[in-house]
Image (spheres, rainbow, N blue to C red):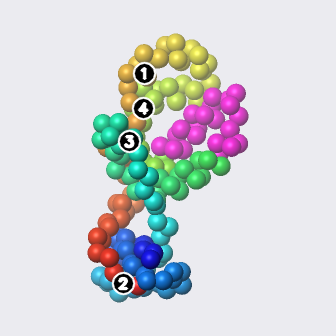
Amino acid sequence: MPIYEFYCTPCNTIFSFFSKTINTATIPDCPKCGKALQRQVSLFACIDRSREDSGGEDFPLDESRLEGAMTRLSSEAEKLNENDPRQAARLMRMFSDMTGVKLGDGMQEALSRLESGEDPDAIEAEMGDMLQNEDPFLPGQTRSRGKKSAPLRDETLYDL
């Protein structure tokens, strides 16, 4: 018995609908505003100990935004010339831009130096200790790009 997720743009909310049978054709209206909803690809949970081991620090990311970024970045990574550190730096910047995750000061400096053509080994020799002691990402901080905030999730299970 599947549960389908739908997104309402005006309400910026994801709603869950229960169906007694597989039903990929029905698109319900929003329970709040009555507008037609958009079908969402549902993410699934994977149970492991990584959340416990990470100290509980989670990035406040929109999961669908992160999933889209990872899909686009994987195709970029396939084209990556591993002998060109500028391309690696560009890929890291793309990740930051697509997800809105801020990079730490040390990572920002290292990427700028890679992009300017400096030798990666020289950067590592000079900045290695600082980079090892710094989280490359700033937990809990994302850049706002003028877009809507992450969608709300209505916890009610509606009938399809």
Quarter placement of the N terminus:
bottom left
Front-most of residues 50 and 105: 50
- Does the magenta portion include 81? yes
Q: Nearer the viewer, mark 4 or mark 2?
A: 2
Residue bearing mark 2: 159
Distance between the alpha carbons at the discs numbered 4 and 2: 44 Å
* Between marks 1 and 3 in the image, the one whose residue lies nearer the viewer: 3
In the rendered structure, does residue 50 fall within the stretch colored magenta? no
Cα separation between marks 3 and 4: 22 Å
Can residue 8 be seen? no
**CA neighbours of label 2 inside 10 A, class few (<14), some (14 to 19), many (20+):** few
Please state which amino acid type lies under the numbered disc 4: Pro
Marking on residue 96: none
Question: What residue did someone put label 1 on?
Answer: 132
Q: Are dots 4 and 1 in contact, CB under 8 Å? A: no
Label 3, label 2: how many angstroms apart (C-alpha)?
A: 34 Å
Mark 1 to mark 3 CA distance (whole Å): 23 Å
Mark 4 burial class by Cα count in 10 Å: few <14, some 14-19, many 20+: some
Do the CB atoms of the residues marked 1 and 2 lie less than 8 Å apart?
no
Report the magenta residues as a range: 76-96
Sequence-earlier tag: 3 or 4: 3
Front residue of this view, candidates 54 and 131: 54
The percent position of residue 137, horizontal first and vertical second, equals 40, 36
Badge 4 marks a residue whose secondary structure is loop
According to the image, label 4 marks what residue? 136
**Helix, strand or loop status at disc 3:** loop
Q: Which residue in the structure is indicated by mark 3?
A: 49
